[in-house]
Amino acid sequence: MKILAINGSPRKSWNTATLLQKALEGGAASGAGTELIHLYELNYKGCTSCFTCKKIDGKRACAMRDDLTPVLEKMKDASALIFGSPIYFGHITSGLAACLERFLYPYVIYSRETPSVFPGKLATAFIYTMNISEEILARLKPKLNSFEAPAARVLGEKPEILCSCDTWQYPDYSKYEHSMFSLEDKARQKAERFPLDCEAAYHLGARLSQKAAELAGKCSAA
């Protein structure tokens, strides 16, 4: 059993990556193998509407060949997936959106009887980090990620969601304009709230590992 975490942040060791790593630690403690992939290390682009994946009797996989191709294979074969992204202008990063286009779309066929041809069910989660308060998040949350519903429809399971708000953005705030923020509040969040978010991510990973095991058991029984 393997949990694959997909980091949609350009940064490999900041808030999003930290939470993903904590989630993987939780999964590993429950017995799962783990791997963290940084999308911004790869050279790829989003769906180009070639429709090769929609051909009758065709292969239900993205026909494009680039650095994302082996990652998509790993995602298909994983026991569970955790997607992480900072929120830019109310949405996930373009890097993660492009990855999700390439991963999900081939399994959507235009059939009234068969909404998804993904082989089985896959436990998933989305982890979001953002520079906004929980109050603002409450207003934006319905529009935060348009991929949650398609992921649930294609992969057969409603994803878990974890949001980390008002995150610490810069290594040294003195070097950047930040007058609209309270540095004391930011420091308090970093010291007090973010560790709780890390703990929540750890437990999310443990739950996802257990869910993956349950789905695997059901598949074997069938």
Image: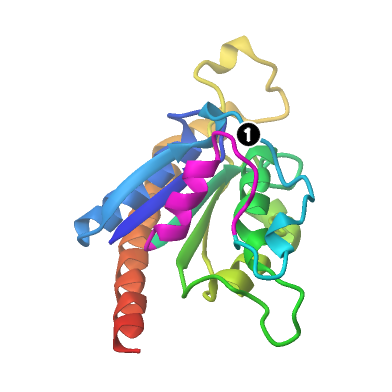
The residue most toward the right is 49
Of the pair 54 and 38, the residue shown nearer to us: 54
| Span shown in magenta | 61-79
Of the pair 97 and 44, the residue shown nearer to us: 44
The residue most toward the front is 57
Quarter in which the N terminus is drawn: bottom left
Q: Quadrant of residue 94?
A: top right
Taking the spot 37% from the left edge, 63% from the top edge, the residue there is 79
Taking the spot 63% from the left edge, 34% from the top edge, the residue there is 44
Q: Residue 194, position in %: x, y?
A: 43, 43
Q: Is residue 192 visible?
A: no
Q: Is residue 103 visible?
A: yes
Q: Residue 33, position in %: x, y?
A: 26, 53
Read off the residue under disc 1: 44
Q: Quadrant of residue 116?
A: bottom right
Regarding mark 1 in the picture, which secondary structure is present there? Answer: loop
User: Relative to 68, does residue 136 appear above or below in the rendering?
Assistant: below
User: Relative to 197, does residue 67 appear above or below in the rendering?
Assistant: above
- Residue 121 horizontal side relative to residue 40, left or right: left
Of the pair 87 and 118, the residue shown nearer to us: 118
User: Relative to 198, does residue 76 appear above or below in the rendering?
Assistant: below
Q: Residue 58, position in %: x, y?
A: 65, 64
Q: Quadrant of residue 216?
A: bottom left
Quarter in which the C terminus is drawn: bottom left
